[in-house]
Image (cartoon, rainbow, N blue to C red):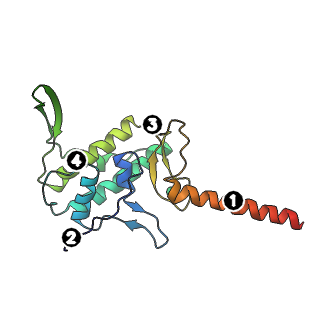
Amino acid sequence: MNMTQAPDFRELGDHVALDMINTVEQSAAGPLDRWQSDSDVNAWLASVGMAPDQKAAPTGLLDGARKLREAVRLLVSQRKAGAPLELSALNRALAAGGSHLELAVQDGSSLSLARRYPSRTAAEWLLPVAEAAADLLVHGDFDLVRKCESDACSLWFYDRTRSHKRRWCSMALCGNRHKVAAFRKRESDDAATRTR
Ligand SMILES: [Zn+2]
């Protein structure tokens, strides 16, 4: 079999712009970038439902996507910190433009409205994600946009839980690690008290 295995993308950000940021994460061996080729970016766009149908990735997609990702990462942390926003890179990505609305009749009677994007250049391919990031910056509640509480973790998420008390990228990755560490600390504190 000659299938290229799509990288295992994390989908825990609960917002496509945060999932994009999370395609780079800290690991014991240094930053791990799940985008290593144009087709990796294509596979990611498909995984979030934003890839053009049945098309090979244009050259330059990886480069454009990485630039967009770092611009959005910076903006999200600036917005979170209440710092001045460096908007020019994202505005350049938004300027690809060229999308339009299209009406379609479905099931004979109901009418739907969808936005259609051009898909010739890398910038056009990335436009839906750039627009999603812009929407997050404008309409997102940044009390609920958070980085995972683990210092060793770089993943971001949008806390859509009812209680708004989400602390971890995921229980499996960081939440359990924290619980185990807290348990060990309690045990060793107890042991220290006993030997005193
Ligand atoms: Zn984490």
| Residue 13 position within the rendered picture, expressed as x and y whole percent measured from the top left | 41, 49
Asked if residue 83 can be seen in this view, the reply is no
Return the mark for residue 28: none
Q: Residues within 10 Å of mark 4 (few under 14, many from 20)?
A: many
What quarter of the picture does the C terminus occupy?
Answer: bottom right
| Amino acid carrying mark 4 in the image | Leu
Query: Residue placed at 48% from the left, 42% from the top?
Result: 159
| Residue 177 position within the rendered picture, expressed as x and y whole percent measured from the top left | 58, 61
Q: Earlier in the sequence, mark 4 or mark 2?
A: 2
Report the side of 152 relative to 49 (left or right).
Answer: right
Report the side of 9 relative to 83 (left or right).
Answer: left
Q: Secondary structure at mark 4?
A: helix
What quarter of the picture does the N terminus occupy?
Answer: bottom left
Marks 4/2: CA–CA distance: 28 Å
Query: Residue placed at 22% from the left, 47% from the top?
Result: 127
Q: Pointers 3 and 1 in contact (CB under 8 A)?
A: no
Does mark 2's beta carbon lie closer than 8 Å to ligand 1? no
Q: Pointers 4 and 2 in contact (CB under 8 A)?
A: no
Badge 2 is on which residue?
Answer: 3
Q: Earlier in the sequence, mark 1 or mark 2?
A: 2
Q: Earlier in the sequence, mark 3 or mark 1?
A: 3
Marks 2/3: CA–CA distance: 41 Å
Q: Secondary structure at mark 1?
A: helix
Marks 3/1: CA–CA distance: 33 Å
